[in-house]
Image: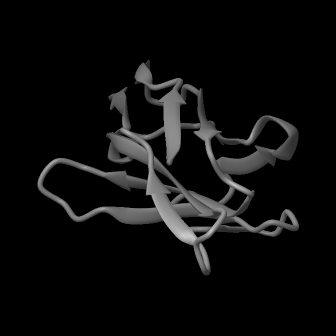
Amino acid sequence: QVQLVESGGGLVQAGGALRLSCAASGSFVSINAMAWYRQAPGKQREWVAGIGSGGTTNYADSVKGRFTISRDNAKNTVYLQMINLKPEDTAVYYCNVAARRTYVSGLLDYWGQGTQVTVSS
């Protein structure tokens, strides 16, 4: 299988910054797209940012100009650099990876365990 290990969450004041990372390991042929999602208490999980295999990035309107998604293919890792954090950014952040495995047709979807980001006012 594929395992995703997230790190980098924590407690910061409004206006602060955090960098999340998500490293993929296990048995897979290649990784296609990577993305970050978040889920605040009492709310649905929402998409935050995504990056394609060629490096194309997309962001939710709420984080444009503040968050940057990037990837290191050699390390099978995706990052989320967050600056100018706001209290409304408080949520559990999850990484998502689409990977191709041997003997399996198409792409498979994997999720990280989540990392807590708390922004105080």
The residue under the point 47% across, 56% down is: 110
Q: Position of residue 1 (x, y in %)?
A: 50, 48
Which of the 4 image quadrants contains residue 63?
Answer: bottom right
Tag count: 0
**Image check: 98 left or right of 5?**
right
Q: Position of residue 18 (x, y in %)?
A: 57, 27
Q: Position of residue 3 (x, y in %)?
A: 50, 40
**Image check: 70 left or right of 89?**
right
The residue under the point 33% across, 41% down is: 92
> Toward the viewer: 100 or 93?
100
Q: Colour scheme used in the picture? A: one colour
Q: Position of residue 88 (x, y in %)?
A: 34, 47
Q: Split into 4 quadrants, where in the image is the C terminus?
A: top left
The residue under the point 37% across, 65% down is: 46
> Toward the viewer: 85 or 51?
51
> Toward the viewer: 107 or 38?
107
The residue under the point 51% across, 40% down is: 4
The correct choice, above or below, for 59 with respect to 24 in the image is below
Q: Is residue 61 visible?
A: no
The correct choice, above or below, for 97 with respect to 9 in the image is below
The residue most toward the front is 103
The residue most toward the left is 42
**Image check: 69 left or right of 90?**
right
